[in-house]
Image (spheres, rainbow, N blue to C red):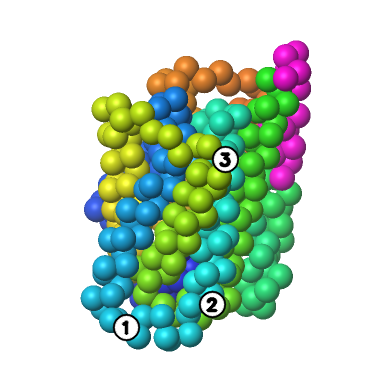
Amino acid sequence: MSAVAALPAPARRPLDSLATGVMLLLCVCWGFQQIAIKLVAADISPIMQVGLRSAFAALVLGAVVWRAEGSRALRDGTLGAGVLVGLLFGVEFLAIAQGLVYTTASHMSVFLYTAPIFTALGLHWRVPEERMAPLQWLGVAVAFGGIAVAFLGNGQPQAAAASNMLLGDSLGLLGGLLWGATTVAIRRTALSEAAPSKTLFYQMAIAALVLLVYAAATGNAGIRYTPSAMLSVAFQSVVVALSSYLAWFWLLRRYLASRLSILSFMTPLFGVSFGVLILDEPLDGAFVLGALMVLAGISLVSGAGLLREKLRRGRRA
């Protein structure tokens, strides 16, 4: 999803039943990916899982880009920006994978999806036409208040366990920040006019290199070839890293991005639900309250334009 800003902004239509159904499936898929990683972490490290899925997606996308552009693919002025965006993307997933070692998939799903807040702040600072309205600043304040509440809820009696979870949550928040920085970088560079498949190729290729080298250097490259591990890696490679992103791009080319963004907030809800139901992860009251505040804040930031549009229509009516 980090390559969203690479798309141009053609005329788009409101959501219909097809778009809503596809978005529902995507949110289920994205909400389950942290669960899939945790389920087989004993057989293959999270770092290695994300590295392998990125490598698979990079190979497929590289073939697509080569077929479309041939040898001129890296001579169109996007290489420098591609390396920058790829490094941001790679470190983002390094933070996510390492964070899952210390915190729950439920916590990771919420903290990672703070990305729209950091995107809005970055665009406000770097792109004059993306200045935030007062309602969006209120959303930022609510979201960061929710983060504070969720973090304060980690003060459990078990000091060591609380410290580990706090570290994992911090890495999840770092992943959200880097996701937002990646989107801003794409918007501000030559990649803003590049094909989505090319932007995603840069991200996946550099991420695969960063993650696989890190896994080898830290002794996390070992794999136990169990059926569940192979199934999880296949799901993440084919469904998450390739098919879901391409489906997301397809939606963005045809439908209003603001409506799609609102629906994408179902992802952390699915992530938390799956974590509780499948992994039997505990939920404390402070985290639940903080998560709801984060989602409310993100909704205000991303939905402010839609709300203003509805208010204008109401005044005209």
Disc 3 element: loop
For image coordinates 64% across by 36% down, the residue present is 169
Could you tell me which secondary element the residue under label 2 belongs to? helix
Q: Amino acid at mark 1?
A: Ser
Q: 244 left or right of 294?
A: left
Was residue 152 drawn as part of the magenta stretch in this picture?
yes
State the image quarter where residue 160 is shown. Answer: top right
Residue 159: give x, y in percent of width and height. 76, 18
- Can residue 94 be seen here? The reply is yes
Mark 3 or 1: in front is: 3
Residues drawn in magenta: 144-160
Q: Counting residues from the N terminus, which is met first, the one under dot 1 or under dot 2?
A: 1
Considering the whole magenta stretch, tell me its main secondary structure.
helix
- Name the spot of residue 18 as percent of width and height, x first: 24, 53
**In screen coordinates, is 31 left or right of 122?**
left
Which residue is the site of mark 3?
A: 218
Residue 302 in the image, given as x and y percentages of width and height? 56, 57
Question: Mark 2 highlights which residue?
Answer: 80
184 up-or-down from 54: above or below = below
Q: Is any atom of residue 27 visible in this view?
A: no
For the residue marked with disc 3, what is the amino acid? Thr
Residue at 69% x, 34% y is 167
Question: Is 290 part of what is drawn in magenta?
Answer: no
Residue underneath mark 1: 71
Q: Earlier in the sequence, mark 3 or mark 2?
A: 2
